[in-house]
Amino acid sequence: MKVLFIGDIVGSVGRKALEDVLPYVKQKYQPDIIIANGENAAGGRGITRKIANHFYDLGVHGITMGNHTWDNKEIFDFIDDEERIVRPANFPSGTPGRGFTVIKNKSKQLVIVNLQGRTFLPPLDCPFEKADEILNQLHKNYKNILVDFHAEATSEKIAMGWYLDGKVSVVLGTHTHVQTNDNQILPQGTAYVTDIGMVGSKEGVLGMERLSVLRKFKTQLPVRFIPDEGKWQFHGSIIEIDESTGLAKKIDLIRLAEDQVIFE
Amino acid sequence: MKVLFIGDIVGSVGRKALEDVLPYVKQKYQPDIIIANGENAAGGRGITRKIANHFYDLGVHGITMGNHTWDNKEIFDFIDDEERIVRPANFPSGTPGRGFTVIKNKSKQLVIVNLQGRTFLPPLDCPFEKADEILNQLHKNYKNILVDFHAEATSEKIAMGWYLDGKVSVVLGTHTHVQTNDNQILPQGTAYVTDIGMVGSKEGVLGMERLSVLRKFKTQLPVRFIPDEGKWQFHGSIIEIDESTGLAKKIDLIRLAEDQVIFE
Amino acid sequence: MKVLFIGDIVGSVGRKALEDVLPYVKQKYQPDIIIANGENAAGGRGITRKIANHFYDLGVHGITMGNHTWDNKEIFDFIDDEERIVRPANFPSGTPGRGFTVIKNKSKQLVIVNLQGRTFLPPLDCPFEKADEILNQLHKNYKNILVDFHAEATSEKIAMGWYLDGKVSVVLGTHTHVQTNDNQILPQGTAYVTDIGMVGSKEGVLGMERLSVLRKFKTQLPVRFIPDEGKWQFHGSIIEIDESTGLAKKIDLIRLAEDQVIFE
Amino acid sequence: MKVLFIGDIVGSVGRKALEDVLPYVKQKYQPDIIIANGENAAGGRGITRKIANHFYDLGVHGITMGNHTWDNKEIFDFIDDEERIVRPANFPSGTPGRGFTVIKNKSKQLVIVNLQGRTFLPPLDCPFEKADEILNQLHKNYKNILVDFHAEATSEKIAMGWYLDGKVSVVLGTHTHVQTNDNQILPQGTAYVTDIGMVGSKEGVLGMERLSVLRKFKTQLPVRFIPDEGKWQFHGSIIEIDESTGLAKKIDLIRLAEDQVIFE
Ligand SMILES: [Fe+2]
Ligand SMILES: [Fe+2]
Ligand SMILES: [Fe+2]
Ligand SMILES: [Fe+2]
Ligand SMILES: [Fe+2]
Ligand SMILES: [Fe+2]
Ligand SMILES: [Fe+2]
Ligand SMILES: [Fe+2]
């Protein structure tokens, strides 16, 4: 099974990049299942039902979130009924939505799990303990499992990679919006990359307008950030999973930019 | 001019990797000047005079540091006299050592500047303001300038890239120990990459023994970290600078691992 | 000279408490100069010109701020022209407003200085270095100096107390909204207290509605905080300064609550 | 029942203060049960068996800890067998020691619970959820319950006070080492104070030698902190509990200093 994972999609430029690039990427890589991180899809903050539906229409099968899950209040209206979206599983019990779900497309199925790191981020439940708990449950019925570990610190993400090596098909990171060059198959067969990167303006800072971000760093005054309107970049990863074992055979990075790509 | 920059060298495995790989990399890329980050060279914490000298013997011309600069107390004995080492320039005035220096090799010269980020790191002076101050001074006499921005947050690093675009030859990041896949020439001609990565054990977490790191995350109890003894990875970057303008022509990543590399 | 300092005034309950209590406190203590922290005066976030003027009408002579200085955008319209308001002096150079000012009432004058801590707070310039710089300037002409060190960590506040002991009349803390029971004259003659406390609802959390704060801690979901509407508490301090030396003779705490106080 | 709670005892000066003051305080207040925070007892970092035994010999019946629980490695040897010491209950399951225990003296018994905050502190399990879990268990058999909430942020501590109001006898805070002037009986009958303060040198910063702390703030270089050797301060609180209801009748602060106290 081939899985395409697409990094944090930021604002309208990110959504436009998805529209422009997904047909090309689908044709080139023929993924069986497509997952995208949607925590910044609505103006950089959260996601709406309409945007999620748009993603499905474009071919996305499942959506992971992160620390920005709740930024757009609309999510509270639909997350409980929306089985294709996962938010970090280690939010306190009672949190709306779900932390893992089964994504199906034709004969293929993949469980996606969302966890959030705690280093430099708010204090949720332990993501390692939560991973144990979820996998105990999943391993009775499922082998093909992708974990999106939405976290800031490289140490926490790499530690999670080692922790889950051999227990899941893929551990990949999101949140920093910068793709890392460490895609690899870990010794026990789990595909790993510290961060997938993002989809949105390449001319901003993490997809947001850069002068306002610079103003914040230089002045420490309150600044309102808006998504940048520049040319896009599109970051993702293609992972090949051996469905019989649930282990990964290959993990490749996708790094495209509007001003460089040639649609063959 | 071709510059080779080598990511944070961690412990004895990192030093051994340098010994093994540098001859090969020198032959392949023919760099004019070689700079390495040395903040984790001595057992993961700081650097000693002996290790610095060993680096010079291997062909390193200049060393940058970071938040671990002072971890090995020996540095206070030699940093004031050691013109080839820079520590973050935005430490308070009066701090031992220097924040920038001119590195020369044969007819080539490159100014290296070290700055440290403040997001998720201790409160130093503003790195953006400090960059302005240093460049005001340097621009009278120098064009070929490399900035090692030692920082955690991708936003702060990318912001610095934009801030210095066109003003220096290279802005590269260190500290996260994970190489990022965003090497690029910015619009005004500055080469940029968010993080160079590291040199040290590939089987650890950021070069440190992984079970102890996992124990820390899972138990929150005090844990002593030691450098991992596993097979090495070697991350660096080759940057080509047009000496007449001080702008960059090319920035490539180097990503080697002991178990994969074939020395041609 | 007797100085009355009033802790962070929070929202409309805080403003009402000021109206109710100030006449009584003025009569009882006969302060020469009255200073209040106003960073939470407007709905818990910042201050407006109208509220500042209301404070002056009630008898306040000078206003200090803190990390919430800029929360109400109106302040950018008037802070440059408003000589009775100080914001933390260690914001970057070029920040609107001023970090210290001379407050006069009849024959009395007191310099008020506002500094902000960096522990658990955003990275401003070093408050200790900034204090040195300001005092170098002030000591040519002034002896009676009050420093409002707006900071979170007790260690940083106490360290500032020791640092300025003998150099200013008073070092007092604001920001935590809880009055500390450590008012004292330090050995070299400076009055000190770690935190003055606040003026606003006693039934909330730091003056804000308590159920929403609890909801935040328990759910980690986004929550909008509004000032609580409960009965007030009023915290302040009365400091007696020997004007000839600029040193303090006495520092007492004021702790009043709406349901307990009897206006004699 | 009268309970004496003594704030974080720091190093040898703190231990000496306990020796000097406890007889006097016992005679004056006649407490039935004496609890002390011991996380800084051994050179400022953790506690040893010998020190704990010394505390018991002086009349302490139970010891609470905090974020420094594990600083002295010796604790791993005895905490499992030592029923009079509690460490924060919201460490991960499997952590050595216990989070609550029953302290008895003659006919009196008091359950002591230790919880640690997460704001500006490492990411433990949710202290609010853990409090619920423990109280569900305790309320079957116990009414007289004291919670030491070891936390940094005033907001988190006050929130815990409100959260447990009416459910326990006392919620008091430790960790900041500065006594707060907000002792009160909350509306539902729980005694509350944000921080008890400390026992140790009054001439340091939180009990540690002050020049080294200042050096740290000013230079950001590594500094070794040692307990200060100055004159002591002794902070505690006396709480009167109605044993039949488990609610508090009174909470008073104790603030003594070596250079001021007169043993009557
Ligand atoms: Fe994101
Ligand atoms: Fe995120
Ligand atoms: Fe490093
Ligand atoms: Fe570093
Ligand atoms: Fe405030
Ligand atoms: Fe504040
Ligand atoms: Fe403590
Ligand atoms: Fe503590």
Image: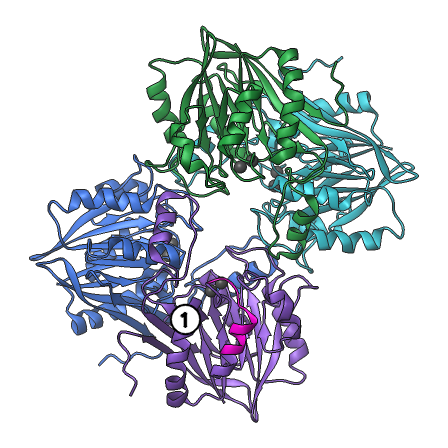
Chain colours: A blue, B purple, C cyan, D green
Residue C199 appears in the figure: no
Q: Residue D9, percent across and down?
A: 59, 31
Residue D54 vertical placement versus B239 (above, below): above
Disc 1: CA contacts within 10 A as few (<14), some (14-19) or many (>=20): many
Q: Which residues are magenta?
A: B44-54
Q: Quadrant of residue D227?
A: top right
Q: Is residue B193 magenta?
A: no
Residue B28 appears in the figure: yes
Q: Is residue B51 magenta?
A: yes
Q: Quadrant of residue B195?
A: bottom left
Q: Residue D210, percent across and down?
A: 69, 44
Residue assigned mark 1: B14
Q: Amino acid at mark 1?
A: Gly
Task: Determine whether the residue tagged by mark 1 lies in a helix, strand or loop.
Answer: helix
Q: Residue at x 36, y 16 (%)?
A: D139
Where's ligand 7: which quadrant?
Answer: top right
Q: Residue furthest bottom?
A: B107
| For residue C102, side relative to residue A51 (left or right) | right
In this view of the protein, which residue sits in the foreground, D34 or A183?
Answer: D34
In which chain is the residue bearing label 1? B
Q: Residue C164, percent across and down?
A: 77, 45
